[in-house]
Amino acid sequence: MPTENRASGNHRDTENKEHLNNGSDTPERSPDSGGSDNREYGNLRRHPLELKIPPVVVFGFFAAVMWTIAVYFPVFAVDIPFHLTITVFLFVVGIATGLYSIYLFLRIRTTVHAHKPSDSRTLLTTGPYKHTRNPMYLSLSIVLIAWAIFLSDLLALMLMPAFYGYMTRFQIIPEERELAEKFGEEYRDYAERTPRWL
């Protein structure tokens, strides 16, 4: 009968809609498929300078440029009150943070090699790594700020954004890309709750 045919047709349409709503035709993404880190880094082209220059060398370069500016181009030299006290305090904080961060890496026997983050055995999320994803690089920046304050030159201090920019683009982001590929969802969760710098 026509009524029965229409009823059976409506029943089949309902089943097809339920089938589609259940997502049986949509492929599921595994937790470690790298979807979120691909979205974050996929549009960023790899650069020949990535992971090439050791962070300590970058630090030394900026420190030398700051000294050159303060000595030969002291246009923005200023008198900073208690600059020696501030310098010593920041220097101690920076060195202590860096050494403690390295100690934690050595204690769990994972690599501290800045050029091979993929060799990391364990994702460290305790100690200073609970508050910043890059305490070693943060410690270098703190010492560099202390050096600029010691030189008492505003132009030298204004070089800090360039240091942060270089380290972020050519050292930190490439490291994050490799760590996300290796540790998957574990690293992505860590990156979501912990700031890159501070």
Image (cartoon, rainbow, N blue to C red):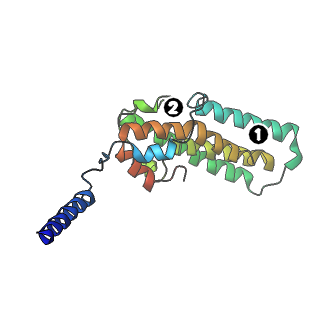
Which quarter shows the N terminus? bottom left
Amino acid tagged 1: Met
Say which of 141 and 41 sits in front: 41
For label 2, the SS is loop
Lateral position of residue 7 relative to residue 32, left or right: left
Label 1 sits on residue:
66
Lateral position of residue 108 relative to residue 23, left or right: right
Dot 2 surroundings within 10 Å: few (below 14), some, or many (20 or more)? some
Say which of 196 and 135 sits in front: 196
Q: Which mark is residue 114?
A: 2
Say which of 94 and 47 sits in front: 47
Q: Which mark is residue 30?
A: none
Q: Earlier in the sequence, mark 2 or mark 1?
A: 1
Amino acid tagged 2: Ala
Of labels 2 and 1, the one closer to you:
2
Residue 146 visible, this orientation: no
Q: Residue at x 44, y 54 (%)?
A: 192
For label 1, the SS is helix
Residue 191 visible, this orientation: yes
Tell me where residue 30 sits by quadrant: top left
Tell me where residue 51 sits by quadrant: top right
Report x, y in % for residue 191. Answer: 44, 50
Q: CA distance from mark 2 to mark 1?
A: 24 Å
Dot 1 surroundings within 10 Å: few (below 14), some, or many (20 or more)? many
Q: Residue at x 63, y 30 (%)?
A: 57
Report x, y in % for residue 74. Answer: 87, 44
Lateral position of residue 90 relative to residue 117, left or right: right
Report x, y in % for residue 17. Answer: 25, 62
